[in-house]
Image (cartoon, helix red, strand yellow):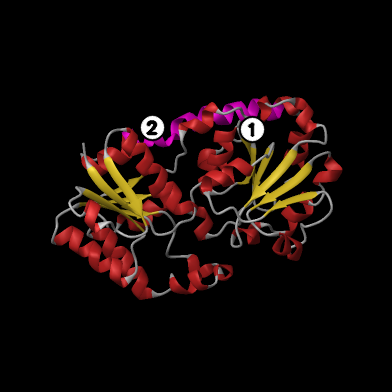
Amino acid sequence: MGKAWLWSADEGGCGWYRTVIVAEALRALGHDVGSGLEFDHEGYGDCDAVLGQRVSSPGPSILWSRFNFQQAKRTLFDADDDYFHLSEHPEFGRSAVEYGNTRLQTRILANAGMSTFTTCVSPVIAEMFADYCTNTVVVPNGLPKAYLDQPARYELDPLSLKDGPTVGWAGTAFTKWELTNDVKEVLSKVGDMGGKLHTVGVPFHEMREIGLARPGVSITGWVPDSYAYLDVVDFDIWVAPYRRTRYNEAKAPTKALEAAFLGIPIVASDTIPYRAFVRDGVTGFLVPPGGDWETPIRTLINEPELRAQMGAAAREVAQEYTIERLAARLWAPLLFGDRP
């Protein structure tokens, strides 16, 4: 069995998806795998392989070079985001400025190019690295199979819906800007449609500033632990709007993945990542730019049988994306064997 260190770039959702739960799944397969924000020289200095999530700062870049050229470790540079078009989203603040820096972008490409593999969360990101990296592999996000063993929302006691089904949105201080006026207008009418609105991830005062903190709306602020975050999701219908920008078109369809594992139908923007995951009319609905958000949301509020049917279909799709399956079929071969 192999020994590896999965080097996280952050303690948020990205690090959780690309290192923490991957390490857990690989350990279950019998490998000696650790993960963290700093490389564990004492415990894993002799490891066979290292995964580095978006290695880009000068210090980590020097260490990455040593792994590749002095220690001849098997290295996976993990590209979990589009680092080259963040500057087009000024709402990202400091990150937009940092990742718009040519030197930083050059370090990213250099670090990826020297690696054994570049693992990319989406096909669009893989295309960005393909000209610079010999071995580029798409490894999608997954979630633990344990979520599929839990009751889905549509399987709960119908009495829990006596006040109407919950329409939910989950995001961050960055993705709140994806709530454009047309989407906010529809969400503000969820109560009139017979449902309830619950937002997760952005605190009350920020939701008030964008006009969605109003009577009848439940607001849960930032939940730092990813396991706890999924525990607070009590949506019956998940809404995931995204503008059609180059950055958004390269994203992973994370909200659709989470909705699928929890058995929740989704109403999402018709962008490249969501189009590839959501089966329109089967596991949810896709809304084109300038399209109608109200009709699919209203339909799902009023048709519990359709919600259950779509939630069950989404869970069938989720079977293909368990982290255990991805660890065995993709992560373990990339870290310890041949290209899958």
Q: Which mark is residue 184?
A: none
Residue drawn at point x = 73 percent, y = 64 percent: 205
Q: Quadrant of the N terminus?
A: top left
Q: Is residue 184 magenta?
A: no
State whether residue 325 is above or below residue 231.
Answer: above
In contact (CB < 8 Å): disc 1 and disc 2: no
Position of residue 207 in the picture relative to residue 262 (left or right) = right
Q: In which quadrant of the rendered view does residue 171 lie?
A: bottom right
State whether residue 300 is above or below residue 11.
Answer: above
Looking at the image, which residue sits at the far front?
A: 42
Q: Quadrant of the C terminus?
A: top left
| Mark nearer the viewer, 1 or 2 | 2
- How far apart marks 1 and 2 lie (CA) works out to 27 Å
Numbered disc 2: secondary structure = helix
Residue 122 visible somewhere in the drawing: no
Q: In which quadrant of the rendered view does residue 284 lie?
A: top right
Q: Where is mark 1, residue-wise?
A: 281
Magenta span: helix, strand or loop, mainly? helix
Residue 136 visible somewhere in the drawing: yes
Position of residue 22 in the picture relative to residue 189 (left or right) = left
Of residues 337 and 219, the one drawn nearer to the viewer in this rendering: 219
Which amino acid type is shown beneath numbered disc 2? Arg
Whole-percent x and y of residue 103?
A: 34, 75
Which contiguous range is marked in magenta? 306-328
Q: Which mark is residue 325?
A: 2
Which amino acid type is shown beneath numbered disc 1? Gly
Q: In which quadrant of the rendered view does residue 263 lie?
A: top right
Numbered disc 1: secondary structure = loop
Whole-percent x and y of residue 285?
A: 65, 38
